[in-house]
Amino acid sequence: MNQSSTVHASAVLVGPRAVLIRGPAGSGKSRLALALIQTGTSGALRFSRLVGDDRVHLETSHGRLLVRPAEALAGLIEVRGLGIRKVPFERSAVVCLVADLAAADSERLPTPKSAGAEVVGIVLPRLAVAPGEDPFPLLIAALQTPDSGH
């Protein structure tokens, strides 16, 4: 049985997998999404493209979590100081990592419990970023380095 939900979050396709970016208002979800997109444009990441900003639709399918932009916001991203801008976007992607910004439970060495997130019934790896910490280098490290298995 498929489950679905619309949530306040952003999502960016990085290579073959999408990152779901969650956090409270003002925590930097759009800023992090834009930084990932710009890093893909510069060639530092092989490929990156917006899936959705501010609100995304999540749906389970065959044990995977799919993300799509909210129709009214497809291809739009907020750029603080400039307003809403139109950018190329993907219509759907498979989520493989959840980044929680301003996470109260972030830890220097996360426990297995805090290193995972259940989203619409699917358990995914989770990056919990402490309030005030820059999420960008942590997210790049999570995407580019293998889990050590500890």
Image (tube, rainbow, N blue to C red):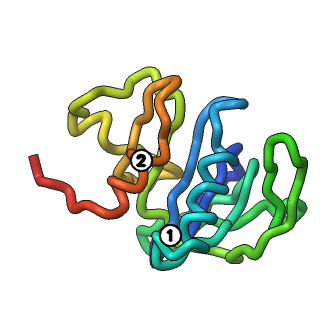
- Looking at the picture, tell me which residue is in the foreground, 12 or 57: 12
Q: In this view, does 96 lie to the left or right of 38?
A: left
Q: Is residue 138 left or right of residue 19?
A: left
- Looking at the picture, tell me which residue is in the foreground, 103 or 85: 85
Report helix, strand or loop for mark 2.
helix
Answer above or below: position of 116 versus 50.
Answer: above
Answer above or below: position of 23 versus 145.
Answer: above
The residue where tag 1 is placed is 14
Q: Which of marks 1 and 2 is in front?
A: 2
Q: Residue 38 carries which label?
A: none
Mark 1 / mark 2, whichever is N-terminal: 1
Residue 2: image x %, image y %? Answer: 56, 66
Q: In this view, does 25 lie to the left or right of 2?
A: right
Q: Can residue 124 be seen in this view?
A: yes
The residue where tag 2 is placed is 137
Q: Which residue lies furthest to the front in this view?
A: 42
Residue 6: image x %, image y %? Answer: 71, 51
- Looking at the picture, tell me which residue is in the foreground, 120 or 31: 31
Q: Quadrant of residue 74?
A: bottom right
Label 2 environment density (alpha carbons within 10 Å; few <14, some 14–19, many ≥20): few
Q: In which quarter of the image is residue 112?
A: top left
Residue found 64% across the figure and 38% down from its top: 28
Report helix, strand or loop for mark 1.
strand
Residue 29: image x %, image y %? Answer: 64, 43
Residue found 75% across the figure and 48% down from its top: 54
